[in-house]
């Protein structure tokens, strides 16, 4: 009789701390044994000359998120998680966004309906708290944290989402008390509105002006303010989608003071610059995202931050809008001002291959740090570890067999999202996932998607250990 449902033999297993050759035995979707010469499996994979990695955890992506009248995301939970699996990701944490004036609980229920029966891989939810009124903060938020939604994002910009400083303080106070992780979109709203008005008055409305309306100083100021508010409350925060040097300086300064300030960056800040917004006609709209991509010096700063440990998390910020689509990038027409272009770019499938090829193979980060940034750290920071984010006995058998020798060219036609472009079209990369395994089931193998809609399970998150305050209790 077979000892295991699946055995992966002779691969080079990589965790956030170690690299070693061994076999992995899987029973009932979980890792049951690590060792040499394990007994037979009903299914066997020879992973000689391959890395065997914990499946990627994409802790920042947007799927099927309602965007208001006339705008529609290109990926729902089926196409988005299919694309994720083909790129080596086995867990996603998209956002359940609250509308101002509506209940947070209703937003979470709505997202369950959107994901249920569709997700191909496992998923949890962050919440987006856009309405910090009394009942929501005092009752709904604590109840939802208790129910396994232990992280939420708040915005310092966008009229329909932003909280003011007082509301941020009150929300952070609840996060501290309840043990949740707060993610912050740090850009100064008034500065952006003022610059946008000035640019439009000069008829500077093309996509490239999106970057001019959101310069680094706007991100730097908000990052510093977010850190100060979090220090006042004494609660950890994670600054999302950090774009360059000025925000990094603030984060490094905070970390140097011993504050629990974590940071995330994304592929667009390593591989795109503001020049990508300055393409013929309306093409630049493809790379409109916030904060915007900066320049080569900032790209280098982001690489340094990945190397030196300023960043703990590398996410896609997949925010999928089709380009040639009246509900996508062209929702307001090609001559409309940049401020009406839906913000966000696709990247859920290219996240791991880009970082491996340009980070690991160019010697900027080693493979254990690659695993930490793309899988282990996000699992820890959002309360999914050790079920997700590592290769250990008892963990879910979410595993990627990585072919380090594969050379391939990124083509949108070869990706599995429902977006009609990729910003990385034509890039030649080395290394890619050969096989993706989700709870013991092969969902991607040698170029074929083998997963199924509805197989992905909802994950209740634990209260993350990194969300614990330093203990400077001021009595609230
Ligand atoms: N913030 C995000 O997190 N994603 C897309 C756009 C934005 O502003
Ligand atoms: Zn954001
Ligand atoms: Zn985002």
Image (cartoon, rainbow, N blue to C red):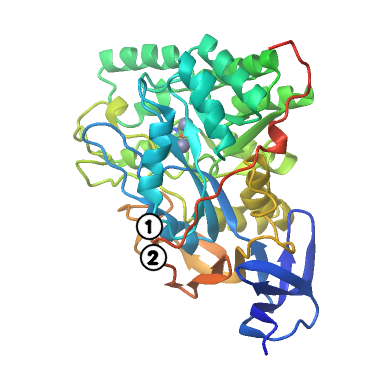
Q: Position of residue 274 (x, y in %)?
A: 44, 34
Q: Quadrant of the C terminus?
A: top right
Q: Nearer the viewer, residue 415 or 272?
A: 415
SS assignment at label 1: loop
Q: Circle 2 is placed at which residue position?
A: 414
- In the displayed structure image, the side of residue 436 where residue 160 appears, left or right: left
Q: Position of residue 462 (x, y in %)?
A: 64, 42
Q: Residue at x 29, y 21 (%)?
A: 204
Q: Circle 1 is placed at which residue position?
A: 117
Q: Residue at x 70, y 54 (%)?
A: 363
- In the displayed structure image, the side of residue 428 where residue 257 appears, left or right: right
- In the displayed structure image, the side of residue 199 where residue 439 appears, left or right: right
Within 8 Å: ligand 3 and the Cβ of disc 1? Answer: no
SS assignment at label 2: helix
Could you tell me how far apart the alpha carbons at marks 1 and 2 are, in whole angstroms? 25 Å
Q: Residue at x 61, y 29 (%)?
A: 245
């Amino acid at each position: 009789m077979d000892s295991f449902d699946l055995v992966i033999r002779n691969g080079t297993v990589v965790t956030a701390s170690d690299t070693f050759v061994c076999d992995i035995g899987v029973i009932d979707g979980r890792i049951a044994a690590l060792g040499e010469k394990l007994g037979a499996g009903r299914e066997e994979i020879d992973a000689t000359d391959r890395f065997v990695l914990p499946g990627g955890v994409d802790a920042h992506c947007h799927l099927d998120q309602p965007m208001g009248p006339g705008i529609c995301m290109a990926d729902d939970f089926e196409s988005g998680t299919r694309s994720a699996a083909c790129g080596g990701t086995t867990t996603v944490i998209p956002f359940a966004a609250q509308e101002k004036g509506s209940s947070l609980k209703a937003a979470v229920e709505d997202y369950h309906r959107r994901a249920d029966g569709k997700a191909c891989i496992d998923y949890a939810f962050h919440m987006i708290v856009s309405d910090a009124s009394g009942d929501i903060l005092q009752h709904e938020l604590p109840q939802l944290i208790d129910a396994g939604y232990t992280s939420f994002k708040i915005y310092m910009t966008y009229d329909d989402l932003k909280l003011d400083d007082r509301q941020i303080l009150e929300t952070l106070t609840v996060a501290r008390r309840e043990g949740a992780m707060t993610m912050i979109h740090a850009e100064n709203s008034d500065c952006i509105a003022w610059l946008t008005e000035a640019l439009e008055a000069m008829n500077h409305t093309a996509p490239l002006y999106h970057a001019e309306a959101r310069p680094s100083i706007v991100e730097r100021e908000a990052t510093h303010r977010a850190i100060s508010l979090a220090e006042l409350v004494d609660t950890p925060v994670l600054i999302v989608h950090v774009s360059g040097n000025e925000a990094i300086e603030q984060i490094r300064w905070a970390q140097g003071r011993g504050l629990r300030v974590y940071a995330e960056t994304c592929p667009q800040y390593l591989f795109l610059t503001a020049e990508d917004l300055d393409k013929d006609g309306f093409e630049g709209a493809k790379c409109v995202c916030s904060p915007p991509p900066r320049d080569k010096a900032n790209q280098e700063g982001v690489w340094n931050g990945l190397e030196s440990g300023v960043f703990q998390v590398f996410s896609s910020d997949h925010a999928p809008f089709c380009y040639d689509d009246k509900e996508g990038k062209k929702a307001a027409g090609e001559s409309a001002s940049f401020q009406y272009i839906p913000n966000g770019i696709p990247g859920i499938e290219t996240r791991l291959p880009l970082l491996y090829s340009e980070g690991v193979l160019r010697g900027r980060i080693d493979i254990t740090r690659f695993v930490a940034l793309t899988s282990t750290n996000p699992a820890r920071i959002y309360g999914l570890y050790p079920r997700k984010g590592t290769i250990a006995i008892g963990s879910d058998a979410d595993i990627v067999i990585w072919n380090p020798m594969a050379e391939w060219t990124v083509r949108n036609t070869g990706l599995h999202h429902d977006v009609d472009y990729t910003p990385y079209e034509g890039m030649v990369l080395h290394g890619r996932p050969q096989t993706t395994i989700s709870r013991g089931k092969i969902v991607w193998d040698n170029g074929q998607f083998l997963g199924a809609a509805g197989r992905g399970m909802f994950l209740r998150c634990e209260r993350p250990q990194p969300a614990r305050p330093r203990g400077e209790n001021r009595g609230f």
